[in-house]
Image (spheres, rainbow, N blue to C red):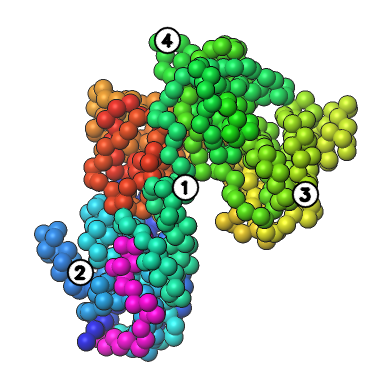
Amino acid sequence: MATLISVNVGMPKDVPWQGSTVHTGVWKESVTGPRMVRRLNVDGDGQGDLNGHGGEQRAVLVYQLDSYRYWQDQLKRDDFTYGQFGENFTVEGMSDQEVCIGDRYRIGGAVFEVTQPRVTCYRVGLRMAEPRMAALLVSHHRPGFYMRVLTEGQVEAGDEIVKVADGPEKMTVAEMDALLYLPGHSRAQLERGLRIPALSPGWKTSLHDLLESADSPATGNRGLTGAATSPPPAWPGFRPLKVARIEPESSSIFSLVLASPEGDPLPPAQPGQFITLRLQPTPEGPPLIRTYSLSGRPGAPAYRISVKQEPHGAASGHLRHHVKAGDVLDVGAPRGTFVLAEGDNPVLLISAGVGATPVLAMLHALAEAFSRRPVWWLHGARDGAGHPFAREVRALLERLPNAHLHVSYSRPRADDRLGVDYTAAGRLSAERIGGLGLPADADAYLCGPAAFMDDLSQALGGLGIAPARIHTEVFGALSAVRPGVVAGAARAPHLPAHPPGTGTGPTVSFARSGITVPWDPGYGTLLELAEACDVPTRWSCRTGVCHTCETAVLSGRVDYAPEPIDAPAEGNALICCSQPPVDLVLDL
């Protein structure tokens, strides 16, 4: 007979962690007497990060006394108290190997439904003073689980737990957890999991993404990260390519066409991908590593990149003033997940300035296929002199039967022709696109300054376009994902202020941030090195489980310690648990 042993609650609080402050509700304390359980919470309880915890589908977290005993033995500890694992209900019985997704239980005056396994993030390790805990919960098949509240009511320690309905597929919590996080995502099991109505929407999305790639040769875990959707790079590291020609595109943008020195066609890229250049302006100085979107026709025998010369840009200035036709550059293979998706629905290609480059490659692909999809080209430029690819775009749109064009000039010149060179004066803004009659079932691809993309992404959402259909590409460093960490003053990436040792190991280059640092084992992991440089990072578990930190390896390779639960996609690395044995270039 299963029994509720303890009811545990706790409101979020700030706790110190690795020089930062974390806002978290993982500290729970046992309470006496009855407690009301409502749709979103047990009275007196709260969550610090609602993106990963809490809400209707994760109202109550359950953990078992049997797992308490197991971890006491495994970790050689005897200091556990109820709520130690951040759970609301500590129970006797209800093991993860027996409870199924969709099972329903009556506890006291409330009725609950099991919705998903625990989301394993670093905060359970913070609470346990055991950084490996997120990985251990998964690898030992003891995650615990969430329930939603079907009937609100009071519960109390000592209440009997009565099962009132079985989940329709009888898939246990442990099976569901392994299906997402561990290797071996079989089509039959994924389809079985998706047939469970009670499974939370987030997990359904993950299983659906895994199912779409079940028969694909692609590697990695698409259910956990979009970084696994990029195909393996066509070649490792850098290879020499010759500058075939250089072409002006606007007053500040120019294109370089890169070809194989041997004259053979280059491997095809997907429309929207980028390549990486390693430049050496001076023999004695560090290399400059930059990524540039491909702007030419996918499948062409040579690659075209288009570069905006920034006023103080070291790389763009070097390319503009010192590189000439016939020169040979070190080039990394096409990479990136900002790619045109197949389908029949409308396509919105939205850009500002040099942000036109990746969406121009998409327009080339649509024109090459004589696509009948409705295609909208929306672009913002300062004026006619700063408007790149104007003739090229119009020629491509003429090949599409359902094409639409809107070009905004923020400061048109006297000789810029309204209705010919541009459609409207003013910035391409949320207010502007709101009146264009854009279709709500479109896939939207945006590239430009961060504020531009934020503004227009929000506007597209307001027009009814689903967030999953709004895709953005960032030229610089990606925005950080550090769940629960209280944001401090933003700092530009820099060399470490206090290196842990001599720093005589391999060099690590963060391509998007323009930083190259010698490795020292004192950093522990590549993630910790990036953090020491204030390079924006993305992570959650910090132990090789969640794949939030999965990053493209542009050159080099990594070693793992500890080994990740499930391997990343080929050509990627989990930086939270890896170290560089050789010189390394990361897409960070």
Task: Using the image, determine if residue 255 lies above or below residue 118.
Answer: above
Task: First in sequence, mark 1 or 4: give its number.
Answer: 1
Task: First in sequence, mark 3 or 2: give its number.
Answer: 2
Is there a contact, CB below 8 Å, between mark 3 and mark 2?
no
**x%, y% of residue 225?**
43, 51
Closer to the camera: disc 4 or disc 3?
A: 3
- Amino acid type indicated by mark 3: Asn
* Quadrant where the C terminus is found in the figure: top left
Question: Is residue 326 a member of the stretch shown in magenta?
Answer: no
* C-alpha separation, residue under disc 1 versus residue under disc 3: 29 Å
* C-alpha separation, residue under disc 1 versus residue under disc 4: 37 Å
Crowdedness near tag 2: few (<14), some (14–19) or many (≥20) residues, C-alpha within 10 Å:
many
**The disc label shown at residue 144, or none:** none
Task: First in sequence, mark 4 or 3: give its number.
Answer: 4
Q: Which residue is mark 2?
A: 67
* C-alpha separation, residue under disc 4 versus residue under disc 2: 59 Å
Write the start and end of the magenta stretch as one range: 157-180
Closer to the camera: disc 1 or disc 3?
A: 3
Q: Which residue is mark 3?
A: 402
Is there a contact, CB below 8 Å, between mark 4 and mark 2?
no
Crowdedness near tag 4: few (<14), some (14–19) or many (≥20) residues, C-alpha within 10 Å:
few
Q: Is residue 583 left or right of residue 443?
A: left
Q: Which residue is mark 4?
A: 283
Q: How many marks?
A: 4
